[in-house]
């Protein structure tokens, strides 16, 4: 069981780290924490072992006195939707998102799609499981089924303002996006080039992880070859997405955040916009230029959502391809993001590459990952070494200089130190990157390649 309780969810290899026995205990611990008599809605992805894990988890939840409403196959945002529209006390999704087929896991929320991360509840679930403090309730909770697919599709359809028929491609990577996409497109009167829409959690084509741009090659190629308006790729549980513009180039998530933020600020007036600490300086500049309040946040969907909720902002975006909407109970949805982009494209009548061109004024390094045993020490040393810059320490270290900045932080999900640099010019980037990377390597850190 060691190590299955992560920063944002429970995750591990099915059959070894994560099995039915543990799933049942986790269910009981969660029910003990939330309270008997409360109701939880439960969804699952298409992995074969999501069914036995769902059965074991929901048994544990019911033993702990919670009523369970099973919604069957769905995307993670669909569980959020069910949770915040139907007044459930909690929701859980059985999924391992973009992880390979042997993995599985659970994503828990409280009411209104508020995530339960390690800092705010998963630690307590873990403690109860370890201590075997898992009392059964007097009354076993009820079990019923309901479906939220039609409601979710209507919700998405209601947000579409665009009238244009787009030419685009959608890559579902054999993940859960394929369960909804055909029905959604039919409803909104669009059709798309289909890449890997059939559910197959052996991931025969590529892992459903669009953050690894290698997985976007087929999408880029399709957009280029067919002269499409854009392409979009969903991850395994369809909470994250990445776009490819009409030139077949991947649109970095901070650039897309800037585009959507600008649109919301113009359409709806000033608000806070949340973006993560690795984001381009252009995000802040554009938010400020439209009277918005830029709020930089530590990386991680639970932090981003709670910050957005706290500020009541319209929107937030994160480099991993999560986009958060006040309209969606401050949660993320890849398909709502797709519809939002369609609205923006239709409104301006320009291509995606034209719309984002003004935001590409700085030169980014992309994320450089280092394997090291002394991440904390290196972050502390960097703070001394680059003390002249403007420093921010909400998540690792970010230091800004007039013509460049860097961010150095530990991964929440892997034993890595992650570095991002951005500069005003290519030559400045090469110069500071050489200096920084040279220093890290001299300190024994070595770059990690996928």
Image (spheres, helix red, strand yellow):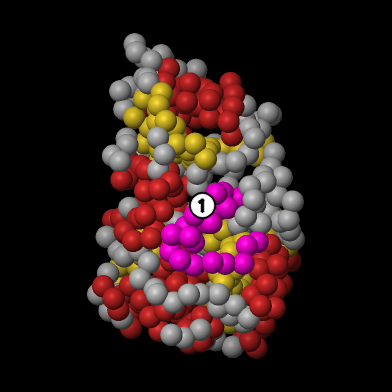
- Splitting the image into 4 quarters, where does residue 41 fall? top left
Q: Residue at x 51, y 84 (%)?
A: 351
Residue 355 in the image: state x and y as whole percent: 47, 84
Position of residue 318 measured from the top left corner of the image (x, y, whole percent): 48, 63
Q: Is residue 158 left or right of residue 92?
A: left
Q: Quadrant of residue 218?
A: bottom right
Which span of residues is magenta-colored?
A: 175-195
The total number of labels drawn is 1
Residue 432 coordinates in the image, percent (x, y): 63, 80
At 50% from the left edge and 47% from the top edge, which residue is drawn? 75
**Left of 315 or right of it: where is 354?**
right
Q: Residue at x 26, y 73 (%)?
A: 268
Q: Is residue 29 above or below residue 225?
A: above
Q: Is residue 344 above or below residue 63?
A: below
Residue 209 sits above or below residue 21 on the image: below
Residue 402 shows in the view: no
Check the picture and name the quadrant holding the C terminus.
bottom right
SS for dot 1: helix
Assess whether residue 176 is covered by the magenta stretch: yes
Q: Label 1 crowding class (10 Å Cα cut-off): few <14, some 14-19, many 20+?
A: many
Question: Which residue is pictured at 30% across the width and 63% down the height?
Answer: 313
Look at the image and tell me whether residue 269 can be seen.
yes
Residue 345: quarter of image: bottom left
Q: Nearer the viewer, residue 8 or 227?
A: 227
Instruction: Look at mark 1 in the image and give the residue it sits on.
Output: 180
Residue 6 in magenta stretch: no
Residue at far left of view: 269
């Amino acid at each position: 069981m060691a190590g299955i309780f992560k920063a944002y969810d429970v995750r591990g290899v099915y059959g070894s780290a994560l099995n039915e026995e543990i799933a049942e205990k986790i269910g009981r611990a969660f029910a003990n924490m939330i309270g008997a008599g409360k109701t939880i809605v439960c969804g699952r992805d298409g992995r074969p072992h999501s069914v036995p894990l769902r059965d074991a988890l929901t048994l544990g939840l019911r033993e702990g006195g919670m009523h369970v409403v099973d919604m069957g196959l769905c995307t993670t945002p669909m569980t959020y939707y069910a949770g915040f529209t139907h007044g459930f006390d909690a929701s859980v999704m059985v999924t391992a998102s973009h992880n390979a087929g042997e993995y599985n896991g659970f994503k828990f929320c409280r009411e209104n799609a508020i995530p339960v991360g390690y800092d705010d509840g998963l630690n307590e679930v873990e403690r109860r499981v370890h201590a075997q403090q898992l009392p059964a309730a007097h009354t076993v909770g009820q079990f019923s089924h309901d479906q939220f697919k039609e409601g979710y599709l209507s919700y998405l359809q209601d947000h579409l303002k665009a009238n244009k028929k787009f030419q685009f491609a959608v890559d579902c990577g054999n993940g859960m996006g394929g369960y909804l996409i055909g029905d959604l497109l039919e409803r909104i009167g669009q059709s798309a080039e289909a890449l890997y829409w059939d559910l197959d959690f052996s991931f025969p084509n590529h892992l459903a992880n669009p953050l690894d741009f290698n997985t976007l090659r087929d999408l880029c190629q399709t957009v280029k070859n067919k002269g499409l308006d854009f392409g979009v790729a969903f991850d395994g549980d369809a909470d994250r997405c990445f776009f490819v513009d009409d030139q077949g180039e991947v649109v970095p998530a901070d650039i897309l955040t800037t585009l959507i933020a600008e649109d919301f600020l113009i359409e709806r007036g000033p608000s806070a916009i949340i973006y993560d600490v690795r984001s381009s300086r252009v995000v802040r500049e554009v938010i400020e230029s439209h009277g918005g309040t830029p709020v930089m946040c530590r990386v991680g969907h639970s932090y981003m959502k709670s910050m957005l909720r706290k500020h009541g902002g319209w929107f937030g975006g994160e480099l991993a391809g999560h986009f958060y909407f006040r309209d969606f109970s401050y949660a993320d949805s890849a398909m709502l993001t797709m519809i939002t982009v369609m609205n923006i494209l239709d409104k301006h009548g320009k291509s995606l590459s034209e719309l984002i061109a003004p935001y590409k004024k700085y030169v980014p390094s992309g994320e450089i990952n280092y394997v090291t045993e002394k991440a904390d020490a290196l972050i502390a040393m960097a703070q001394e070494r680059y003390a002249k810059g403007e420093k921010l320490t909400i998540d690792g270290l970010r230091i800004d200089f007039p013509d460049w900045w860097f961010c150095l932080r530990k991964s929440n999900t892997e034993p890595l130190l992650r570095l991002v640099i951005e500069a005003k010019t290519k030559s400045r980037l090469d110069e500071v990157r050489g200096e920084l990377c040279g220093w890290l390597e001299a300190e024994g850190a070595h770059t990690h390649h996928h």
